[in-house]
Amino acid sequence: MPVGFFLALAPLFFLVQGLLGFSGAILVAAYFVFLLWYRFRQTNSWDEFFLYGVTFLLLFDSPTFTFTPFKLRLWYPLLALAGLLILLERRKSNLTFPVVSSAVGGYVFFYYVTMSSLWLFWDDWDGKLSNLKYLFLAAGLMLFYRSLWFRLSMLQCQAFLRYLATLSIFVSLWGLLQVFFNTFTLFGPLFQRDSYNLRPSAFFSETTWYAEFCLFGILLVIYLINRRLVKPQWVLFLLPLLISLVVSNTRNAFVGLAVAIIGLIFLSLFRRRREPVPLWNRWSVGLLLATTLGLVLASLVAWPEVVAQAQRIVQRFTGNDASGQSRLEAFARSWKELETGWFTGQGYTWHPDQGTAAGTVTGSKSFNLVFMITYIFGWSGLAVLAVGIIAFIRSAVSNYLRYDWLAAKYALVLFAAYFVMSMFTPIHQYPFGLMVFALATVLHRRADA
């Protein structure tokens, strides 16, 4: 249960970080992975151990938790070991595991890996390192999730989804603690890397990833309730997740939430079975009343702060802040690069003059997925991406309309929300974003999940 999970881990994080500072969190993370190893060792559930362990370590995606000048993460060796064991098992048993959702997905994956391998010979040294990073991070992580997902039983899949939702709730609550500490200037940098920022970031490098992880939690909790995989009381966890989005004041998450809501409403019109939605229960009514009362009290007690937060949210959509201006500049420069681009792309090499004032960059490190793919692989790479997306949408829509699979519906919503967000932020360059894309592209193929 999320509450028990938080009450078990939060004091330990608080104690270790209070003694060692923000970086001490990685020790607790390593200890938790050890507990996972001990738990799954007893049942020889190694697939689950790797899934749970790697996923938990993805929460600590901050420069604070990297090692050596190459910025190695703690989950890298765990991922490499899992991949090695999977390959050895396949060779030993001559089994084949469905690591791609379709033949089209296999061709798309093969194209990008092949082109990346060729660019290893042509890029400069920095380009080669970026290339290897993406081959391991993007290709490796997505293959990891897709391979293990189909090896799990129905109950294991459902348990893992509850685990993901629990992690998102834990991250949300820890971020709200950071907001409390920062608002009252408590503890300084002990519990947050960017403690000068009132907005939460949990253990991520910035608030953007925190907000997008909370959005993922919202969609996952709704899915679990509608699939009757958790108790109706889980609807109460939507409150901290939604509050986290508001206090994070992240444009991208607001856009993603809007896309998700529109997608859920639109797809619900095509549902074949008309039955009461478990999301609407007495717990939902109580939550709605409590939220309304809380807003009224907040308006009476802290009306200036409520207005100020509303103004900050509106300000984020004017595009007048440094981040907004930087992205507008990056859009313009990226379009110019596309005009001069060529069919096979320009590889992974990035030039310093491609950076903008606020750090947003173009080229192989683009904030925009379409621009990044086109820069690296050219117009041919963009065409391959379009084919893969169309194949996924066609498969998911077919499974939803023909069989009324809720898994296919939420896979579409997840993919749509995060694809739209990838137009404005490099979520595709971070392991959490790749995990969501991987989960979306396999979820629609398991009606029992």
Image: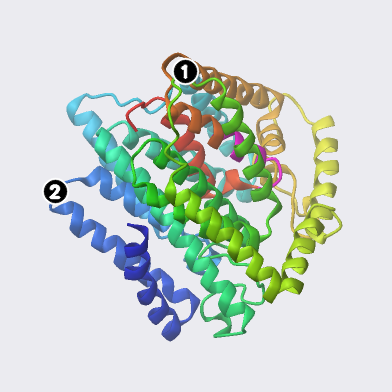
Amino acid type at circle 2 is: Thr
Q: Distance between the residues labelled 1 and 2?
A: 40 Å
Q: Is residue 83 left or right of residue 133?
A: left
Residue 365 position, x and y percent, is 67, 47
Q: In which quarter of the image is the C terminus?
A: top left
Q: Quadrant of the N terminus?
A: bottom left
In reply to whether residue 416 is colored magenta, the answer given is yes
Above-or-below relation of 348 to 56: above
Q: Is residue 199 left or right of residue 343?
A: left
Dot 1 alpha-carbon crowd within 10 angstroms: few under 14, some 14 to 19, many 20 or more = few
First in sequence: mark 1 vs mark 2: 2
In reply to whether residue 358 is colored magenta, the answer given is no
Task: Please state the extent of the stretch shown in magenta in the rendering.
Answer: 415-425
Above-or-below relation of 417 to 103: below
Dot 2 alpha-carbon crowd within 10 angstroms: few under 14, some 14 to 19, many 20 or more = few
Magenta span dominant secondary structure: helix
Amino acid type at circle 1 is: Arg
Q: Residue at x 43, y 27 (%)?
A: 275
Q: Mark 2 points at which residue?
A: 43
Element under label 2?
loop
Q: Which residue is drawn at 86% across and 42% down?
A: 332
Residue 380 position, x and y percent, is 67, 22
Q: Mark 1 points at which residue?
A: 272
Mark linked to residue 71: none
Q: In this view, does 294 lie to the left or right of 401?
A: right
Residue 61, visible in the rendered structure = yes
Q: Is residue 17 left or right of residue 303?
A: left
Residue 401 position, x and y percent, is 49, 16
